Amino acid sequence: MKISEKTYYSIFRAGVVIKALIALGELIAGVAVLFISPARISQFIYALGGVELAEDPGDFIWKIISGGLKDFSATSQWVWSFIFLSHGIVKMFLLGGLWERKLWAYPTSALIFTGFVFYQFYLLNVTTSVLMWLITVFDIVLIGLILHEYGIRKKQLDRSSIEFKD
């Protein structure tokens, strides 16, 4: 089954929007962690999920959340704030370039997101996280879409420059 370029482009744009929402979440988390300690955030999430944990201690979603919270509360809030804010700012900058179809944004985004994927693979070797696997797979698909779109944009620009020269 061949996918049309219009469908590729729609999937690409949807991926950029989803990635931007994730980046926005990182920015919000980065600011929140500046003002609220990781221990306090962990306590709040445990308070919210305590009923769920009591009902089913082996709950799949709760295991993902509680596993992440162990690492979260053990690390300095400044470290977490820096991680969330730097990732969010870099991603928003790159995604803005992709949204505006800036040619420089395609290879730069693919390179930076590939670096994030390698880091995510490192994290997956240290700790198991279904959420991290899902994000990593999403990022790999998005990198493929970015490179595909870059190829299309590059061809369009090459064609327009040839037409301009004639």
Image: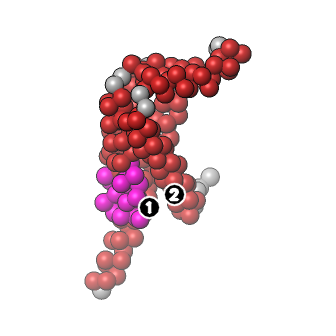
Disc 1 crowd rating (10 Å Cα; few below 14, some 14-19, many 20+) is: some
Please give the residue where the numbered disc 1 appears in the rendered image.
99
* Numbered-mark total: 2
Residue visible at 32% across and 37% down? Answer: 82
Pinpoint residue 158: horizontal percent, then vertical percent: 33, 71
- Element type where label 2 sits in the image: helix
Q: CA distance from mark 2 to mark 1?
A: 7 Å
Determine the residue located farthest toward the left in the rendered image.
165
Q: Residue at x 44, y 22 (%)?
A: 39
Q: Point out the image quarter for the C terminus.
A: bottom left
User: Quadrant of residue 31 in the image?
Assistant: top left
Magenta highlight on residue 92: yes
Q: Quadrant of residue 71?
A: top left
Q: Is residue 71 visible?
A: yes
Q: Please indicate whether residue 160 sits to the left or right of residue 42 in the image.
A: left
Farthest residue, direction bottom = 166
Residue corresponding to mark 2: 13
Q: Pinpoint residue 114: horizontal percent, then vertical percent.
A: 36, 41
Q: Nearer the viewer, residue 129 or 78?
A: 78
Which secondary structure class fits the magenta region best?
helix
Q: Earlier in the sequence, mark 2 or mark 1?
A: 2
Do residues under tags 2 and 1 come within 8 Å of each other at their CB atoms? Answer: yes
Q: Amino acid at mark 1?
A: Trp
SS for dot 1:
helix
Magenta segment boundaries in residue numbering: 91-108
